[in-house]
Amino acid sequence: MKILVTGAKGFIGKNLITELRNRGYADILEYDKDTDLSLLDEYCKEADFVFHLAGVNRPQEQSEYMEGNFGFTSTLLNTLKKYRNTCPVLMSSSIQAELDNPYGKSKKAGEDLLFAYSKETGVKVLVYRLPNVFGKWCRPNYNSAVATFCYNIAHNLPITVNDPTFVMNLVHIDDVVEELISALQGEENCAGQFCEISAVYRISLGEIVDLIYLFKNSREERTVPDMKDSFTKKLYSTYLSYLPEDQFSYSLKMNLDSRGSFTEFIKTVDRGQVSINISKPGVTKGNHWHQTKTEKFLVVSGKGVIRFRKIDSDKVIEYHVSGEKMEVLDIPPGYTHNIENLGDTDMVTIMWANEPFNPEKPDTYYLEV
């Protein structure tokens, strides 16, 4: 199957082509504004499906709106007709096609042209009026507020929010691509004349900015945001895609002593805390118990023993652990416990607690096993 994608180097085109290839679609005909126009004839002759994603949204002159959004659509459709190619054509439009502005008028003109083409030829056409699309590879300081906010905040640059209460309709690029590929497979989501993306998020500019600053601060605070909301998860991924390439890493505070080290890795409000514990050979750590706090220990390097004793019993329970066997130990409340390095190298243990450490209420009581 040969798939023609116009606007191949644009935000949506790049993401779509990448995912098409991930799914085994190898024969993709890429057309963009710098492609030799003569190739359009060849592509329109061979294509089995057309994703018409090319368009103009930030021209030098207003006349370019109509030239790019109507004029090229006309050229594309005339070329398909020239070769009597009746393959389906899917076009990305904009919700601004409903508005009385130069961009909206040009998108509406392109839509009308496509519908007229379908009526004339009987070709299946699909028109998606997209709201604001966000996600990786979107160009900042161009036509996406989300991309601009993510880029500027990640690069410590100022942002401007004229009206923080203004509510945006947003769709994530992965959801757009998923819908476009479903349409390619004949499973489009259409009601009436236009098609749509199922997952549309309504959120104010102020809320978006607050979330992005939360993401930025989370690196310093060793936290991760609550991801149960799908918009937060997608916006977080989007923000990370705009990090400066020399700032992917950030340092953690290692609490060092003669026994080894203890380092907090990740803290969350509702999913607890992950830390890394390093024990020197022969060292025993712990000898404490918790009232309600629970933990999970996973030794990933070295070997040792984890001992438990119920605080009202003399019976000691031992579990031998090793980085050669991935085995998680639950640390129940009411059991004093310790961990001893029995090897001749450092022992590394990943430790999870069901709550972040609170120095005002540590819930940790010293008691020898």
Image (cartoon, grey):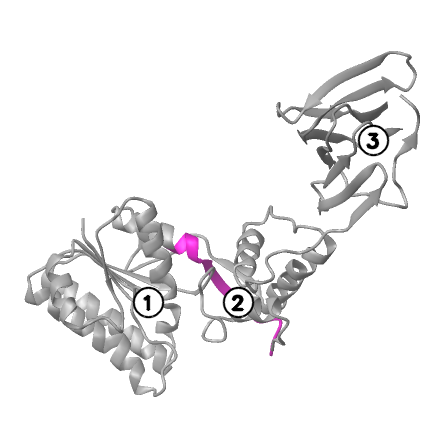
Kind of residue at badge 2: Val
What residue does disc 2 label?
146
Asked whether disc 2 touches disc 1, contact meaning CB atoms under 8 Å apart, the reply is no
At a point 65% along the width and 49% down the height, the residue shown is 226
Asked whether disc 2 touches disc 3, contact meaning CB atoms under 8 Å apart, the reply is no
Q: Which disc is residue 151 wearing? A: none
What residue does disc 3 label?
292
Q: CA distance from mark 3 to mark 1?
A: 55 Å
What residue does disc 1 label?
93
Q: Which contiguous range is marked in magenta?
A: 162-176
Mark 3: few/some/many CA within 10 Å (<14, 14-19, 20+): few
- In percent of width and height, residue 107 lies at 31, 73
> Which callout, 2 or 1, points at the residue further toward the start of the chain?
1
> Which callout, 2 or 3, points at the residue further toward the start of the chain?
2
- In percent of width and height, residue 62 lies at 34, 86
The answer to whether 335 is drawn above or below residue 156 in the figure is above
Label 2: state its secondary structure.
Answer: helix
